[in-house]
Amino acid sequence: MDLGMQLYQSNTTVDIRSSKNTEVDAIEIEAAFTLALSVLLMCCSAVAYQIKERKLYFMPDSAGTILVGVAASAIMALLGHNFSSYLTIVPGIAFYALLPLIVFEAGYCFECSIEFMQNLFPILMYATIGAMISTFIIGYSVFYFAKWGLITSGIDTLNPMEALMFGALISATDPVATLSIMGNKDLNVDGNLYSLVFGESVLNDAVSIVLFKTFGLYYNQHISDFGLDDLTSILVKFSIISFFSVVVGLSMGLVQSYIYKHSNISSYPKMELSVLFLFCYCTYSVAQILSLSGIMALFVNGIVVSHYNAYNLSPESHSTSEHVFSTMASLAENLLFLCMGLFTFSGLLTQHWNMKFALWGLLFCFVARGISIGSISWVTNLLRPNHEKIAGPMQAMVWWAGLRGGIAFALSMNMPGPNKDTYASVTLSICFFTTFICGGLTDFALDKLGMKQIQEPQVPFPIESTSLVGREMKSSKVRESFGLYGYLKMRHSAVRRLDTTVRSTAQSAWQSIDTIYLRPLFGGDNIEE
């Protein structure tokens, strides 16, 4: 008995020591991983600093971040370290930690400039109708090309839902590379162009994510009969999700603003910043629990909070909040682009890459975006006076700026079904091409298209025509550029006055309601206590 007891105690001691050693090893590995990630992010910041300091317009910040990830991935692969297991946590982190920060910051730090208001209609059209046009063109092109055998393996040829999910995620424009260059004051980029690209990007992401989520609700790889009724049901579901997501974001923003407006929380800066941050994730979580789009709700919430609640904050918190959210969003974006680079030699590209799919997918992206931008711009130009038309060079630049980035890649990592890795590898390839090639040639494209200098000062609406004689002298050029119908429409003063009156009336009505009823209740600028 004594011998048996000694053996039992000895084995128990060994098991405890082994367990402790395993825990210690796991802690050390996690610490090493955290250290490596921190060092890599600092390297990304150092690269971005050098790019900005040396004005390397051919190398966007996001491209530099990806290169850091690629280099780290190559070094670890050469050393024989298997790090793919650590990358499996990326989809969850991206959806529940990184994307909410990026989207909320886009809404919270959103600046509603004169150019943005002038181009609000085309921006909304690009972001919503344009995203849907692009989604269906890309999705059905991929599906039927696979069905016809032009794209082999890795695609469901029975149900188009999988391909439509790919069309939705790859339609998410993420022009961080282009905006990092276009936002440089030295280039003096046209304000209307910047507002179109920026406005579309911040709204388009939310729309694409809702489309992706909606298609995901109907995805079933065992169902092959997909008809017009199913497509109609999807569009109705998309509209319902979008509407109620906006309602959730609006409601949460107004509730938050009301609490701040009618309390003394501004006397405690740390507390008000904490509650502001927590409301961000509460909005996202509430929408997700209700099976809505947390991203769209969060973006709307950010705009509402910026418009009302930002003025309820103490001066210290008001200034600090913008810097804190911008910094956190910047780190989140860097982490997404860094992970894209780290995936390069993780086996994702080498094991699941489909070259035909990648090339066709890239072509579909360019064609679909060209059709959506061209058609929407044409419709928009029919409804606008000549001096507000979106000219051909500007349309070309908006088309060129439709890059794919971290959001598209994060969505691809959440694709369902057995072909998930194939879609992720193709998405990664398209993101690399658009970031390095399209983003890198942004400065060249701005030069060639004449988008670097504003030829005439922009006039805020409502516009009183003071240069009619000058426009009459250019009438022949107008005919050549926009056709006879466009020319006659431009000459029709009644149409121009009606357009100006409608926009002015809508703006005045909103300003009156906002100033008289909403701002005194929820807070805002220029409110007399």
Image: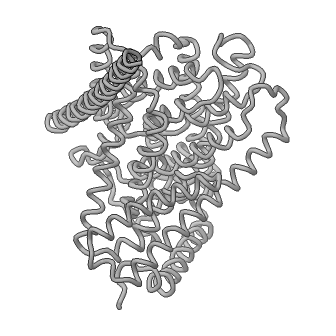
Q: Which colour scheme is used?
A: one colour
Q: Which quadrant does the N terminus fall into?
A: top left
Query: Can residue 310 be seen at all in this image of the molecule?
Result: yes
Q: Position of residue 359 (x, y in %)?
A: 54, 16
The outermost residue toward the bottom is 529
Q: Where is residue 486 in the image (x, y as percent from the top left)?
A: 60, 52
- Of 423 and 390, which appears nearest the observer? 423
Query: Can residue 59 be seen at all in this image of the molecule?
Result: no
Residue drawn at x 34%, y 30% as measured from the top left: 338
Q: In this view, does 123 lie above or below 507?
A: above
Image side of residue 58 versus residue 49, left or right: right
Q: Where is residue 286 in the image (x, y as percent from the top left)?
A: 56, 58
Q: Position of residue 404 (x, y in %)?
A: 46, 33
The answer to which quarter of the image holds residue 296 is bottom right
Image side of residue 23 versus residue 494, left or right: left
Image side of residue 199 versus residue 332, left or right: right
- Of 92 and 202, which appears nearest the observer? 92
The outermost residue toward the front is 1
